[in-house]
Image (cartoon, rainbow, N blue to C red):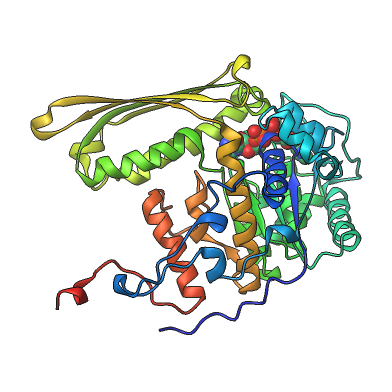
């Protein structure tokens, strides 16, 4: 056995600050409130329902994850956030239309007490959106300082022990790394000079990481995934993770693709299309925001199928991803996948997947897990990029010299092994020779 990490206890209250009180955030907040009152179950959350095997299969040790590592209890979570609209969390949840009104009404008092602070927002980065609840500032530095003041005040007002911050705001326009992102010094100068390569999400990320708060990005825009903010995270001890929650069609893709590759079945085409009618769908109808999402959704197959290692099977893969905004569906997204595959002697086959899912119902348990695991990482002294949380993201943030791991099953093994490592338990390799020797 290795030595366990020294993990500070999860006592006191944990503030969970969410940027954007839209469908994902309100479904998370309302969901946690409903679960705390015993009105529903936290289905889909590893931190609440998952187990972890320890030691040999013959030992019969499989505790719940929440009993194995010291996680903050749901009762100790305090929610807050920012939005460009003034609606409180109850009203925003009704607008989002994910959770039905009778359940929202049971938690109305608690939910409507979560009111958005004025946001840092610039339409340049999200073209299909505008709202009144927005901060004014001399420059981006000033806006970052206002966010830092919000964070400190929220902590003091709610007598919090610790906090985490998660970007659940709209997808920003596509951006590539620019010189201003290359170092902390360049970034801080850029904040003062209003550099256009610093979008709103980066200002929030900067504020959070500056305060040493764990930061995650639920959307595909760059946000903290730039060298300057990774450098800041190392300096302040902030764990960070992202980008783009792995829900819906991409979740299914990263379940099916590793299976096809495991059996060395070839894939010549993968056509994915979606309809959704929520506000996220409306924002993604803008080609610049969609491009950010498209890059995030398309990369998974390249990494899972490894055409460089299996050119006969995957070199010709034609991968297409479409999202169409279609209002009647609201949050109840429908995705279709057509997979053209081939087997022995090149004989062709087809696989069709039709997933009638609920986007935010799949996203909420991830937001909860990421918040609790990042808080755990912080207490365990693990700072910077938390690659073990790749399990939750479409475009996992990773060290520059590595390729990202997209295979859901490898990601899960990595996550659980990280928990074992934290507690000084033997890592599980699945070798199992000892049962036969
Ligand atoms: N399953 C999912 O729903 C899912 C999966 C992966 C990623 N995402 C991403 O998560 C994000 C949130 O999704 P959603 O369905 O909740 O969208 P949404 O449109 O319902 O909510 C986003 C909210 O963010 C607010 N906002 C935008 N910019 C802001 C800013 N600068 N400051 C404060 N608030 C801001 C908007 O006003 C809105 O209320 C999107 O980027 C989406 O692409 C969602």
Q: Where is residue 371 shown, x and y percent of the image?
A: 65, 56
Tell me: residue 4, above or below residue 305: below
Q: Give the residue at x 46% y 25%.
A: 335
Left or right of 267 on screen, residue 2: right
Tell me: residue 172, above or below residue 422: above
Point out the quarter of the image occupied by ligand 1.
top right
Left or right of 22 on screen, residue 130: right
Left or right of 337 on screen, residue 151: right
Determine if residue 247 is in view.
Answer: yes
Closer to the camera in the image, 213 or 336: 336
Determine if residue 307 is in view.
Answer: no
Q: Give the residue at x 82% y 64%.
A: 160
Q: Give the residue at x 23% y 70%.
A: 432
Q: Give the residue at x 55% y 43%.
A: 245
Residue found at the very far left of the displayed protein: 345
Query: How many marks do you count on the picture?
Result: 0
> Which quadrant does the N terminus fall into?
bottom left
**Residue 435 position by quadrant:** bottom left
Closer to the camera in the image, 150 or 278: 278
Tell me: residue 85, above or below residue 81: above
Closer to the camera in the image, 119 or 74: 74
> Which quadrant does the C terminus fall into?
bottom left
């Amino acid at each position: 056995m290795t030595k366990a990490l020294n993990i500070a206890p999860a006592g006191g209250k944990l503030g969970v600050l969410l940027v954007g009180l839209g469908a994902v955030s309100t479904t998370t907040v309302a969901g946690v409130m409903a679960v705390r009152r015993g009105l529903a179950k936290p289905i889909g959350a590893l931190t609440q329902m998952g187990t972890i095997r320890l030691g040999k299969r013959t030992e019969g040790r499989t505790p719940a994850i929440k009993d194995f590592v010291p996680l903050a209890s749901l009762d100790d979570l305090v929610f807050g956030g920012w939005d460009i609209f003034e609606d409180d969390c109850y009203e925003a949840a009704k607008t989002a239309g994910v959770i039905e009104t009778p359940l929202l009404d049971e938690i109305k008092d608690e939910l409507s007490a979560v009111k958005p602070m004025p946001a840092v927002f610039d339409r340049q980065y999200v073209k299909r959106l505008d709202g009144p609840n927005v901060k004014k500032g001399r420059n981006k530095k000033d806006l970052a300082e206002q966010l830092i003041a919000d964070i400190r005040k929220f902590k003091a007002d709610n007598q919090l022990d610790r906090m985490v911050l998660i970007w659940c705001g709209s997808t920003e326009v596509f951006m590539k790394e620019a010189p201003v992102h290359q170092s902390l010094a360049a970034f801080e100068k850029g904040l003062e000079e209003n550099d256009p390569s610093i979008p709103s999400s980066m200002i929030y990320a900067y504020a959070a990481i500056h305060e040493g708060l764990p930061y995650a990005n639920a959307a595909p825009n760059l946000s903290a995934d730039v060298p300057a903010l990774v450098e800041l995270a190392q300096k302040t001890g902030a764990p960070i993770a992202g980008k783009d929650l792995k829900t819906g069609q991409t979740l299914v893709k990263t379940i099916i693709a590793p299976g096809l590759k495991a059996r060395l079945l070839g894939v010549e085409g993968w056509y994915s299309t979606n309809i959704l009618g929520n506000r996220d769908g409306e924002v993604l109808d803008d080609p610049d925001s969609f491009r950010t999402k498209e890059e995030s959704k398309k990369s998974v197959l390249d990494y899972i199928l490894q055409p460089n290692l299996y050119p006969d099977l995957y070199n010709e893969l034609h991968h297409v991803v479409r999202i169409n905004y279609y209002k009647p569906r609201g949050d109840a997204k429908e995705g279709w996948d057509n997979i053209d595959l081939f087997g022995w002697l090149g004989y062709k086959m087809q696989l069709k997947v039709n997933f009638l899912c609920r986007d935010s119902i799949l996203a909420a348990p991830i937001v909860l897990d990421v918040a609790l695991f990042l808080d755990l990482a912080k207490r365990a002294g693990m700072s910077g990029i938390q690659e073990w949380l790749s399990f939750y993201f479409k475009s996992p943030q990773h060290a520059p010299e590595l390729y990202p791991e997209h295979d859901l099953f490898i990601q899960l093994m990595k996550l659980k092994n990280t928990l074992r490592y934290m507690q000084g338990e033997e890592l599980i390799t699945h070798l199992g020779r000892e049962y036969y020797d």
